[in-house]
Image (spheres, rainbow, N blue to C red):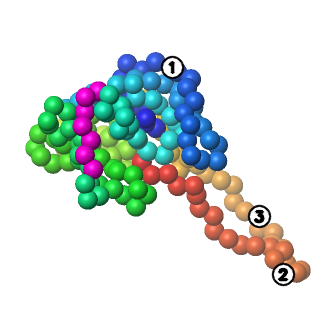
Amino acid sequence: MTNDVQLLRNKRPVNKEIKVASQKGAMIAEQIGKVEMKHCELENVLYIPELRGNLMSVSAIDKQGGKVEFYNGQVKICKNERVIFRGKRNDGGLYAVKEITDEGSVLMTTKHNSVRLWHYRLGHLSPRNMMKLLNISEGIKLTKEEIFQELQSCNRCLKANLKRLPFDNQRSRASQPLEIIHTDICGPIFLL
C-alpha cells in the first residue's frame, strides 16, 4: 500500500475498504497498480491517500515466493536467494526497508524518473531551483516542461505559500481569568 500515486504504473481505479486499527476503522483504496523498482516489481499495490507511509505485506511476499527473515531488530527480504530489501525495526515497532542496489548502497529507487519524486527528495524545491539543478547535476533526467507542469499541483507547496489577512489592530483585554487564551498550534504533521 502506498500514499504516493506517482509510484504506481498501469494504475486503474478501485474502491476497496481496508480495515485498520484507528478511530475510523477503515481507509479507502482509490487505485491499484504496480511499482517498478530496480530489482523487482511490486504487483497489486493499493493507493490509499490517507495512509501515512508505504506498507508491504509479509503475506503477499510469501505468496509470491519471497522470503522474509527477522533477526535482532533487523529484516531482510529475499527472492530466489537474492537479498532485495534490508531494514531495521523503528520506534513504532514497524520495519522500515530499503531496496539494495547493485553498488551495495541502500537507496529507495524506482525505474521511472518522476518529477514529483525528485521534488520530494529535494525537500519540495521550487521549480526555478529545480531548473538550476538540471544545469549543474548529472543523473536527473527531467525536462523544463515536466517540472513546471507537474509542480503546479503540489498540495504541500500550495498550502505552504498561502497568505492570510493580518489580524485586527483592535485589541481587547480579558476581564476575567482564561477569557482570552494565547497559544501556538501545530499539526497534524505527516512524514514522507
Q: Which residue is mark 3?
A: 168
Circle 1: element type: strand
The reply to whether residue 46 is in sight is yes
Q: Which residue is mark 2?
A: 177
In the rendered structure, the answer to whether residue 10 lies left or right of residue 38 reads: right
* Quadrant of the rendered image containing residue 61: top left
Q: Which residue is mark 1?
A: 13
In the rendered structure, the answer to whether residue 82 lies left or right of residue 33 reads: left
Q: Are marks 3 and 1 in contact (CB under 8 Å)?
A: no
Magenta run includes residue 149: no
On the image, the x and y values in percent for residue 18 come to 54, 33
Rendered residue at 33%/50% (across/down): 96
- Of badges 2 and 1, nearer the viewer stands 1
* Quadrant of the rendered image containing residue 147: top left
Viewer-proximal residue, 140 or 7?
7
Circle 3: element type: loop
Q: State the separation of the CA atoms marked 2 and 1.
A: 55 Å
On the image, the x and y values in percent for residue 81 come to 14, 36
Amino acid under disc 1: Pro
Magenta stretch, main secondary structure, is strand
Rendered residue at 42%/20% (across/down): 11
On the image, the x and y values in percent for residue 57 come to 38, 37
Amino acid under disc 3: Asp
